[in-house]
Image (cartoon, grey):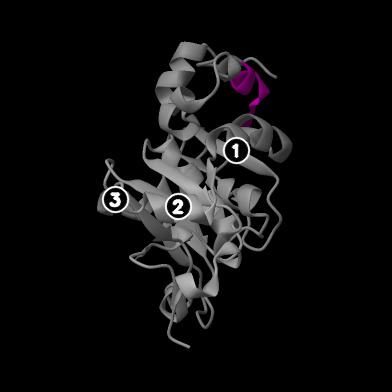
């Protein structure tokens, strides 16, 4: 790794504590994680990730600003979804779910990013942070301050869902954290587990109690589902 400003581990922890969830990582792994990140200088207008491409890196913004856009079906121009500043992270959803990038992130100013390869992201961040729970255990916890969080799109949620579930699509999670209660354990689910793993990762980064329903709705007996079909 190339030496860079702010390379002291304590300063790094202070700047990126939420993005990297240092408190949730196994002892001693923070230093290893820090050493695996690679700094890259970027310029205004650079597209760091592109909608539809395969995910290869996880990114942190050290300096500069970026914007997140998505090309919506039926829209002529991309829709701007969010603005990102120093300390923000992006790119984890495609690495966790295995699906293509669902948005484009473009630099609005010159700056510097840190990036972590998919392999090292999975080894050092995804696997240590995620917690999985089977459907029987999940249902047993619903009376113990736990709630199902359906992270699929609203049309999927309306067609079929688990009882007493709350619906926040995975791509809206960061923008709707204020709607969630830090005293509640959120059991995230989707159809197969990919999107829910990405959502749970973000929640645990932000200090929420969260786990992933192993196997998603595919693992749930039909008689436990609410269906409008």
Q: Looking at the picture, how far across and down is residue 5, in whole percent? A: 53, 16
Q: Residue 211 lies in magenta, yes or no?
A: no
Q: Residue at x 43, y 34 (%)?
A: 86
**First in sequence: mark 1 or mark 2?**
1
Magenta segment: 32-41
Check if mark 3's residue and mark 2's residue have beta carbons within 8 Å. Answer: no
Q: Which of the two marks, 3 or 2, is nearer to us in this view?
A: 2
- Residue carrying label 2: 138
**Label 3 vs 1, first from the N-terminus:** 1
Q: Is residue 171 left or right of residue 50?
A: left
Instruction: State the residue position of label 1.
Output: 126
Q: Are marks 3 and 1 in contact (CB under 8 Å)?
A: no
Residue 168 percent location from the top left of the image: 39, 62
From where the camera sits, is residue 63 visible?
no
Question: Quarter holding the N terminus?
Answer: top right
Marks 3 and 1 sit apart, C-alpha to C-alpha, by 22 Å
In the drawing, what numbered circle is on residue 180? 3
């Amino acid at each position: 790794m190339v030496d860079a400003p702010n390379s002291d581990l304590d300063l790094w922890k202070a700047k990126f504590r939420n993005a990297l969830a240092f408190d949730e990582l196994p002892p001693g792994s923070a230093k290893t994680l820090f050493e695996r990140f690679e700094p890259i200088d970027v310029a205004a207008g650079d597209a760091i990730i592109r909608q539809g491409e395969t995910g290869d890196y996880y990114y942190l913004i050290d300096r500069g600003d970026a914007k997140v856009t998505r090309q919506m079906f039926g829209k002529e121009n991309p829709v701007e979804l969010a603005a990102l500043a120093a300390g923000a992270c992006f790119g984890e959803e495609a690495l966790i779910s295995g699906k293509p990038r669902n948005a484009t992130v473009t630099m609005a100013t010159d700056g510097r990013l840190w990036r972590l390869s998919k392999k090292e992201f999975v080894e050092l961040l995804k696997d240590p942070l995620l917690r999985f729970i089977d459907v029987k255990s999940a249902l047993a916890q619903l009376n113990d301050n736990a709630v199902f969080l359906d992270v699929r799109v609203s049309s999927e949620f309306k067609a079929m869902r688990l009882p007493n579930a709350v619906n926040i699509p995975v791509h809206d999670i960061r923008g709707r954290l204020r709607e969630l209660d830090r005293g509640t354990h959120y059991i995230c689910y989707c159809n197969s587990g990919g999107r829910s793993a990405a959502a749970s990762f973000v929640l645990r980064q932000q200090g929420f109690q969260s786990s992933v329903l192993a196997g998603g709705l595919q693992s749930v007996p039909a008689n436990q589902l609410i269906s409008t079909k």
